[in-house]
Structure formats: structure tokens, C-alpha cells
Amino acid sequence: MSDELVNIRMFSNEMDASMAQQILEQSEISSFVSADDAGGMEPHLQMSMGVRLVVNRKDAERALEILKNADV
């Protein structure tokens, strides 16, 4: 079993990334949202740097399929 984390999707804001994270949680896939926005102090950086949705490599394929079917 691999503990390697992979970025499966990039979003332009944290709200959209969090909604996708909730969909994965409902399917029992652990994930987290990662943004280089100075701890929320510079939210405008989300637009230029992006907000990443990250999962364990072993869950990546299933997670992408779930998000595709949810039209996210």
C-alpha cells in the first residue's frame, strides 16, 4: 500500500475544492485541500496559484471517477 499523495484536481478557489472534497468524503475517500495563499491571508493567490485537491495515490483513479460522475 502506497502512502504517496497526488494532486488530482486544481481549482481556482477554496470553496470549489472543498465541495469536491465533501463529495469524496461521502464516498469514504480521504482527501485534503492545499492552497499557497499565505494561510488564508492572501486569498487572491488562489486564483493565480490554484487550489489543489490531494488524495492517496491508491484512491486517485476512483476519486477522479467519482468527481467526473458528480460533474465537478
Image (cartoon, rainbow, N blue to C red):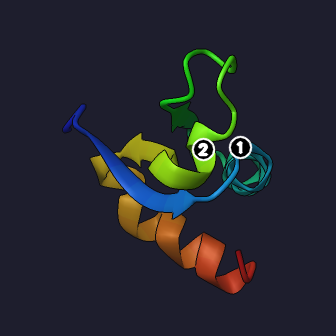
Amino acid carrying label 1: it is Glu
For the residues labelled 1 and 2, the Cα–Cα distance comes to 7 Å
Q: Residue at x 61, y 15 (%)?
A: 39
Quadrant placement of the C terminus: bottom right
Residues tagged 1 and 2 counted as in contact (Cβ below 8 A): yes
Q: Residue at x 19, y 38 (%)?
A: 2
Residue 46: give its label.
2
Q: Secondary structure at mark 2?
A: helix
Q: Residue at x 24, y 31 (%)?
A: 3
Residue indicated by mark 1: 14
N-terminal of the pair, mark 1 or mark 2, is 1
The quarter of the picture where residue 5 lies is top left
The quarter of the picture where residue 28 lies is top right
Along the line of sight, which residue is nearer the eye, 59 or 8? Answer: 8
Along the line of sight, which residue is nearer the eye, 46 or 2? Answer: 46
Residue 24's x, y, as percent?
66, 53
Residue 17's x, y, as percent?
68, 51
Along the line of sight, which residue is nearer the eye, 26 or 33? Answer: 33
Amino acid carrying label 2: it is Gln
Q: Could you classify mark 1 by the number of other residues whose Cα lies within 10 Å: few (under 14), some (14-19), or many (20 or more)?
A: many
Number of marks in picture: 2
Residue 31's x, y, as percent?
55, 39
18 w.r.t. 70: above or below? above
39 w.r.t. 32: above or below? above
Residue 50 seen by the camera: no
Quadrant placement of the N terminus: top left
Q: Secondary structure at mark 1?
A: helix
Q: Is residue 32 left or right of residue 2?
A: right
Q: Residue at x 68, y 17 (%)?
A: 41
